[in-house]
């Protein structure tokens, strides 16, 4: 009997923990800041991130993720874009890089207070993948 009860208790505890982790307490000041910055956001989903509220949402038919401070100060927005959405300077920088023949897997635009950064994820084969970061002028600032 004990052999049945212990696994059931463990299962119940895990289900309760996972269910409680789904509820994110977002400060009102952050909710207000989000609503002001992204009034047309759809499919809003707040994520649990200690000290830095993050939110996933759709805007202009694009997947976005934004991060705020706990005081409601916006820090950054990541928007999934297509290769065609890259500015000409960034596309040119990518084509002049040593990764110009690597297939593109994903492209993101990061808006921050200090400016815009573009991340282009490329891979060659199953083991070689890189995240390439470009500034607005098309200069690669980092590859990792």
Image: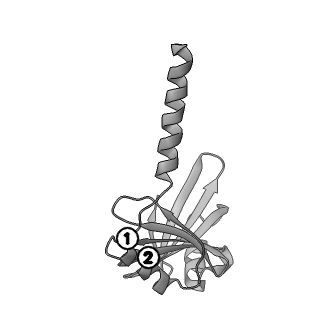
Residue 107, image x, y percentages: 60, 69
Residue 59, image x, y percentages: 61, 79
Query: What crowding class fits label 1: few (fewer than 14 Cα within 10 Å), some (14-19), or many (20 or more)?
Result: few
Is residue 107 placed above or below 136 in the rendered structure? above
Residue 2, image x, y percentages: 51, 14
Is residue 23 placed above or below 108 in the rendered structure? above
Give the quadrant of residue 73. Answer: bottom left
The answer, for residue 80, to whether it is visible in the render is: no
Quadrant for the N terminus in the image? top right
Question: In the picture provided, is 96 more to the left or to the right than 103?
Answer: left
Residue 13, image x, y percentages: 48, 35
The number of numbered badges drawn on the structure is 2
Q: Label for residue 88?
A: none
Foreground residue among 89 and 41: 41
Give the quadrant of residue 74. Answer: bottom left
Foreground residue among 115 and 130: 115
| Residue located 52% across and 83% down the image | 38
Is residue 3 placed above or below 117 in the rendered structure? above
Question: Which residue bears the numbered disc 1?
Answer: 27
Question: Which residue bears the numbered disc 2?
Answer: 31
Foreground residue among 59 and 126: 59
Question: In the picture provided, is 100 more to the left or to the right than 74?
Answer: right
Question: In the picture provided, is 84 more to the left or to the right than 25?
Answer: right
Question: Mark 1 near mark 2, Cβ–Cβ under 8 Å?
Answer: yes
- Between marks 1 and 2, how big is the CA–CA gap? 7 Å
Query: Regarding mark 1 in the picture, which secondary structure is present there?
Result: loop
């Amino acid at each position: 009997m004990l052999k049945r009860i212990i696994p059931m208790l463990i299962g119940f505890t895990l289900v309760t923990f996972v269910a409680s982790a789904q509820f994110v307490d977002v400060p009102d000041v952050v909710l207000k800041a989000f609503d002001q910055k992204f009034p047309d956001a759809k499919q809003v989903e707040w994520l649990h991130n200690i000290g830095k509220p993050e939110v996933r949402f759709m805007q202009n038919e694009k997947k976005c993720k934004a991060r705020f401070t706990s005081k409601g100060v916006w820090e950054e927005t990541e928007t999934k874009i297509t290769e065609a959405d890259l500015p000409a300077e960034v596309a040119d920088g990518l084509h002049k890089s040593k990764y110009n023949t690597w297939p593109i897997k994903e492209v993101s635009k990061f808006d921050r207070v200090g400016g815009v950064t573009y991340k282009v994820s490329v891979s060659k084969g199953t083991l070689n993948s890189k995240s390439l970061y470009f500034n607005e002028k098309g200069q690669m600032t980092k590859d990792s």
